[in-house]
Structures are given as C-alpha cells and as structure tokens.
Image: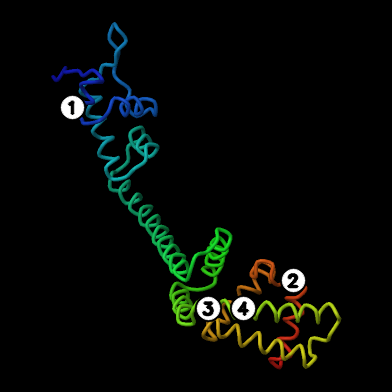
Amino acid sequence: MNTRTWHIGALAKETGLTVRTLRHYEHEGLLTPSHRNDTGHRVYSSADVTRLYEILVLRRIGLGLAAIREQLESPRDLRDVVAEHLTATREASAVQQRLIERLQRVHTSLEFGQLSSEALLRVMEDMTMLERYLSTEQMERLREHRSSVGVERIRAASVEQQAILQELDAARVAGTDPSAPDVLELVGRLKALFLEFVGEPELAGAMISMVQSEGSAVASHGLVSEELGAYLSKAIGVSSGD
C-alpha cells in the first residue's frame, strides 16, 4: 500500500506546477489535500496525486475548470466528454475563423488609406451588417469589386451620392411628386452609382433586401431618413415600372 505523502512545495516541484496553481485548484474545489499536519501545512496523499493527474489530463485537452469539476464529481464516459468538447471546440474555431475573415477585410479597407477611429468603426459596422445578408463568397466578390474600382472613385461616388440624396430630400420636403421627371432623373443617377459601387445585380438585390429589413436610417447610418427612404421607394417603383 502506497502511503507516501507530499507537502505542497514538493508536489509542485514534482508535477511542474506552481504552488499558486495548486492553491487555486483547491479554491475551485478540484483538489483538496487529504489532511493538514500539526503545523497546518497541506499534506497530499497518493489518491490526491492521482486526482491531480486526472485534472491535468482534462486540462490538456482543453476543458475548463468548471467542466473538470463536474467530471470529477459525476464521472461520465470520457468518450462522451471528449466528443462534446470536440463539438464545442469546432464551433469556437468557426467563430474565430469568421473573426479572422472580418479582420482581414478591415485590414484591406485600411490599406486604402488612414481611417479615423470613427470611420473605422463605421467600416466594421457595415461589414457586420452586410454579413447577415451576404454569403462569404458574395462578401469576397464585393470586396474584390471595391478594390478594382479604387478608393478615389469610391470617395468621389460617395460625395456625388450625398449630393443626389440632398436634392431628393429637398424635393420631398417641397412636396414634389415622386414620379416627377426631375426626381426620376436623380433616382436614375443614384441607381447607376449604386450598381457601380456594388458591381452586379445579385449583390445589389441582397443589399436592397438589407435596406428593406434594417430600415433606411439604420442601413445608411442616418444618411437616409425613414421619410426619405419611403419617398425613394415610391420613386424607384415608378422608375422601374412597378
């Protein structure tokens, strides 16, 4: 019968752990020494060490302390434990991969030039919103198209777009009928800019769905009010023959 015992310092040295780690395991209810000696020092038994190595094995495969405590208190077939952890790890890996792709797109946007913190936040918000409506492949096609158009043209088109929207809003406030020729001419220019920016009808359709779902004000970060959005919708319907 193995009656060997270890004080905390000796156990830490033998296992390569720190005394602080062993105390933390005790605090978390994972490893409590079998007893304390007359001076109050922790004394670990062979059973305690066996339990410690079980903890280390479970830690090595990536289980958190709460999951380890649950396994030690209510042991289950390790095959089930590993299978569940594998599924969770794959899901976490997929989330991390999506984050990597998002950061790559942000980095690509930054390559166009220096952005202020506010502008960078806007880029990230736009990407997050778009990802709810566009597939990864569509996002990549949109990014490639924007890259081919070039930052200077995108900036110029943005200025032109804002000017057109201001004219349209002025027409709305003045009570001009959405079917008026001047309004339809402005809408035609806006459509052309949008298609130039997006590159293909499929992506345009997906982004229009985004605007319809999110609302004009949210999708445009306040550039297009809900009132102007409704006015535009009527004018676009007329210009499309709806």
Q: Where is mark 1, residue-wise? A: 14
Q: Quadrant of residue 232?
A: bottom right
Q: Position of residue 91 (x, y in %)?
A: 40, 57
Question: Quick check: marks 2 and 1 in contact, CB under 8 Å?
Answer: no
Q: Position of residue 113 (x, y in %)?
A: 48, 68
Q: Categorize mark 1 by other alpha carbons within 10 Å: few (<14), some (14-19), many (20+).
A: few
Q: Position of residue 95 (x, y in %)?
A: 42, 58
For this rendering, which residue is in front, 24 or 33? 24
Amino acid, disc 4: Ile
Question: Quick check: marks 4 and 2 in contact, CB under 8 Å?
Answer: no
The residue at the point 30 percent across, 26 percent down is 22
Q: CA distance from mark 3 to mark 2?
A: 29 Å
Question: Quick check: marks 1 and 4 in contact, CB under 8 Å?
Answer: no
Q: Where is mark 2, residue-wise? A: 226
Q: Categorize mark 2 by other alpha carbons within 10 Å: few (<14), some (14-19), many (20+).
A: some
Q: CA distance from mark 4 to mark 3?
A: 24 Å
For this rendering, which residue is in front, 179 or 91? 179
Q: CA distance from mark 2 to mark 1?
A: 69 Å
Q: Is residue 22 left or right of residue 127?
A: left
Mark 1 or mark 4: which comes first in sequence?
1
Q: CA distance from mark 4 to mark 2?
A: 14 Å
Mark 3 or mark 2: which comes first in sequence?
3
Location of residue 4 with respect to 77 vertically, above or below: above
Q: Where is mark 3, residue-wise? A: 152
Q: Categorize mark 3 by other alpha carbons within 10 Å: few (<14), some (14-19), many (20+).
A: few
Q: Is residue 201 left or right of residue 23?
A: right
Mark 1 or mark 3: which comes first in sequence?
1
